Structure formats: C-alpha cells, structure tokens
Image (cartoon, rainbow, N blue to C red):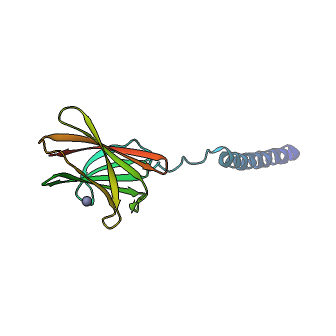
Amino acid sequence: MKTLKSSLIILGSVGLLFLGACGKADQTSDTNTTPPPPPAASQPASSAPATTSAAKGANGGQVVNSGAYHLEFVPEKEATGTHLDLYLQKGDKKEPVPDAKVTAQVQLQNGKQQTLALKYDPEGKHYAVVFPGKEPGQYPVKVNADINGEKVDGRFTFTQ
Ligand SMILES: [Zn+2]
C-alpha cells in the first residue's frame, strides 16, 4: 500500500509539472501567434480627392486641398474687371510654391471659356491675373497648376 501511495503522489506531481509546462507552453505560443496590433488609425489621407471646403482660407478666399497642395482663390472686384489671386502652397507648413504654371479657365456668361495665365507675384507670394469681363453674374473657374509636371486643380467661383 505504501508504494502505491507514493506512486500516486509522484503521478500527481508529474501531472502538476505537466500542467505547469503546458501552461508555459501555451503562453509562449500565445505570444508567438498573437497578430501584431493593427496599425494606428490612418490619418486623413493626404492623397484624398480634392475637396472644396466651405471654410475660409488664411487670406479669406475659397480653399481647395489637392494632395499635398493647398489652393486658395481670392477674387477682388476692380474697376476694370476682377482681380484673381491664387495662393498655391505645399504641405502642412503651407509653403508658397513659386515655380508653377498656373492658369484659370473662366466660364463666361455666354457659356464660352476663357483661359487666363496667372503670374507669380513674389512679394504677395501668390499668382494673379485680372479677369477683364464686366458682365455681372457668377463665374465658375477651374484653376490648373502645373508644378514641375505635377498637376493639381481646383474649382472655384467668383461673382462679377
Ligand atoms: Zn493679388
């Protein structure tokens, strides 16, 4: 009887050891198979399609963000027509982009389009042109900027 008892004790211990080992093994395999945490929620993609924001830009104009670029359109009524300003800026720091080819396609009241080339004004850090039309109304404008072959555009309107 004595030997049987000790055998049971030994079996019990082995069982405990086995359970312990098992637990350890499970833990290890758990860490190994746990998938890495998902990447942090993606930030608003900078490559999102261009969207017109109702918010006013830093210069009080209409804002369109296209990729890394920030376009702000500021029309100003003048005696001879409408002075069109376009601020073309890059990145979060909104650095002015001085070396782009910028044109504005203005849709006229008769349905025709007039393309105007905007010139960079280094002092004002924006592109500008005077639209000579005097007919009152709403003018949709599509601004195209070519930054060393990279093309961005934005749609705006101004009232003459
Ligand atoms: Zn200007």
Between 99 and 132, the one lying in front of the other is 132
- List x then y, in percent, for residue 158: 19, 46
- List x then y, in percent, for residue 9: 80, 48
Write the residue at 40% across / 63% down.
93
Relative to 109, say whether 40 is above or below. Answer: below
Q: Which image quarter has ligand 1?
A: bottom left
Identify the image quadrant of the N terminus: top right
Among the 4 quarters of the image, the one containing residue 29:
top right
**Residue, far right:** 3
- List x then y, in percent, for residue 13: 78, 49
Write the residue at 40% across / 41% down.
49
Write the residue at 77% across / 49% down.
17
Please tell me how many numbered marks the rendered image carries: 0
Relative to 15, say whether 70 is above or below. Answer: below
- Position of 94 with respect to 36 (left or right) is left
Between 95 and 130, the one lying in front of the other is 130
Relative to 98, say whether 43 is above or below. Answer: above
- List x then y, in percent, for residue 21: 75, 49
**Residue, far top:** 111
